[in-house]
Image (spheres, coloured by chain):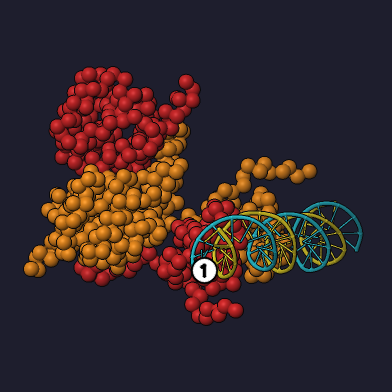
Chain colours: A orange, B red, C cyan, D yellow
Amino acid sequence: MAIEEPPAGVPQDFDALKTVILERKTLLPKRLRQVAAYALDNPDEIAFGTAASIATSADVQPSTLVRFAQHFGFEGFSSLQLIFRARLRERTPGYEDRLRALGDNDHSKLESGSIFNGFMTAAHRSLDNVATSVDPDQFERAVNILAGAETIYLIAKRRSYPISSYMAYAFGKLKVRHQLVGTSAGIDDDMLAMAGKNDAAFAVSFSPYASESANQARMLASRKIPVVSLTDSAFSPLAESSKVWFELVEADHAGFRSLSASMAFAMALTVAIAERRRRLGEGG
Amino acid sequence: MAIEEPPAGVPQDFDALKTVILERKTLLPKRLRQVAAYALDNPDEIAFGTAASIATSADVQPSTLVRFAQHFGFEGFSSLQLIFRARLRERTPGYEDRLRALGDNDHSKLESGSIFNGFMTAAHRSLDNVATSVDPDQFERAVNILAGAETIYLIAKRRSYPISSYMAYAFGKLKVRHQLVGTSAGIDDDMLAMAGKNDAAFAVSFSPYASESANQARMLASRKIPVVSLTDSAFSPLAESSKVWFELVEADHAGFRSLSASMAFAMALTVAIAERRRRLGEGG
DNA sequence: GTCAATATGGAATTTTCGTTCCAAATAGAA
DNA sequence: TTCTATTTGGAACGAAAATTCCATATTGAC
């Protein structure tokens, strides 16, 4: 009369699963151990393969895979596979450690605490995302374009406005000539009309896109004024008007996105531009 | 008898596919364009999902997915999916890896790269810092105070302004009554004079402190209007006027601080307040 | 060595999924 | 407007995959 293990212990993420497998590894029958070894050695195969293909590679029967999964409390092989897939989605360097650190503090007890934690982890994820998705050469090009401009026009509305507003503040401190566009709609176009071919613009717009920003960028582009832009989709109307554009998707928590990563990006760009100018100034 | 396009141009990797999609996106019919946008924005979903699940998320029919794939020269949806899976397997060498490789060389060439990297790591550090230094009970108190207010006055100048500006945007979306103070100095005090004892304020100020913000906070406190504040030192002039205050030190890179962590904090606070209100509203 | 319990292989079954097909709708040309 | 060519939705189909089942093999206890 074997007492069933309470199904409480079904691993919910890859780390937990890995731990359990390693714990019980020696107790497993031959074929199941074979699967265990294969799974930990080739997690990507498990994530992408079919039961049949994996069975062949691991030199077992498909049914053994199902038994393996059930042995660890899963309903079948498919549910086990979900763990391996989730692992690939969330794969970001060093991220697990940070999450663990967050879980340890006692924010999670209170409801507003979980909101707090949610935004912190979302911010971390966003940053990781930016670090991997921004191409250094593109960044370099953007710096070149903007550092070479006489006046930098900063275009942003609504949700993007805080970003350009901060850049304006920083440019002011750094003595970089700039013009913030987007405060009151009426005088925007007059400002932009004064932009000359030695100027450049930096536009920010996230979905849902403010049509004025897109129009203004288009207008500048048509006058051969280079536009660098920051947006959240390759389909953004900004992309087509831009010499260089960056795709930056902020991770969300409960449907709300903060601007953490965008702010870090903006600051990096701002300082890089100022630094480039300083060097150019030295040379000439 | 339509002449078949020579199948020469079937994209073999994700980058090629992305390029082709972007090239032709304007020529695509409505539903196919919808798929195109979804595919580029959610590549992970395409990699792992089933035709049916993806179709649901993208709000099209499964058959549309097949057509989309065939439109770009693939045999069917499955072959297209392989590209998206391959992408996950060969982790694209993003910024982090390339920078690591760059570390050995003298980085005068791509020095903007090191600036970029510097701000990313600084942002991560800031976030970790916030997560450990913000006390959950304090956060809870702050949420209580602000959620209970009729109107929330947002006070911030200069470097802090983008934060309250973003909170104002978010409060607007969330239908939380608020008043942004700090746009033009002249009318600020008139605005604040209207604040009553059922209101509350959220003030942000970082060193070097804007004296007006401190004065305004003091003025409100003297009229028994509760103030919650975000600042970067226990010695901040804001602290003494505040019922609850948070100390948030952004890590710096080369002397410059971004607002990443502050933004994440602000967003967490904003959403927590709105959520609290929603619950209070339900109860009454 | 015998017997019972467990583990395994492989075929049968069922479910799920991708694909195809056709009718209806839409857009575009005349 | 009318007609034609595309595009789209949705059901039907067929293929492929996961799971179940059962006969056989293996292990371990007595």
Asked which quadrant contains residue B240, the reply is top left
Q: Residue at x 63, y 42 (%)?
A: A8
Q: Residue at x 23, y 29 (%)?
A: B239
Is C13 in front, or is A215?
A215
In the figure, A128 relative to A162: above or below?
A: below
Q: Position of residue A117 (x, y in %)?
A: 41, 40
Q: Can you see residue A140?
A: no
Is B172 in front, or is A99?
B172
Q: Can you see residue B76?
A: yes
In the figure, A139 relative to B122: above or below?
A: below
Asked which quadrant contains residue A281, the reply is bottom left
Q: Amino acid at mark 1?
A: Ile
As helix, strand or loop, the secondary structure at mark 1 comes to: helix
- B138 left or right of B66? left
* Residue to which mark 1 is pinned: B83
Q: Position of residue A103 (x, y in %)?
A: 45, 42
Q: Position of residue B206 (x, y in %)?
A: 21, 39
Is A246 in front, or is A61?
A246
Q: Residue at x 27, y 55 (%)?
A: A216
- B221 left or right of A214? left
- B78 left or right of A99? right
Q: Which image quarter holds the N terminus of chain A?
A: top right
Chain ID of residue with mark 1: B
Q: How would you rate the neighbour count of disc 1 (Cα within 10 Å): few for under 14, some for 14-19, many for 20 or more?
A: many
Q: How many marks?
A: 1
Q: Which image quarter holds the C terminus of chain A?
A: bottom left
Asked which quadrant contains residue D1, the reply is bottom right
Q: Position of residue A12 (x, y in %)?
A: 57, 48
- B160 left or right of D14? left
Q: Residue at x 34, y 63 (%)?
A: A240
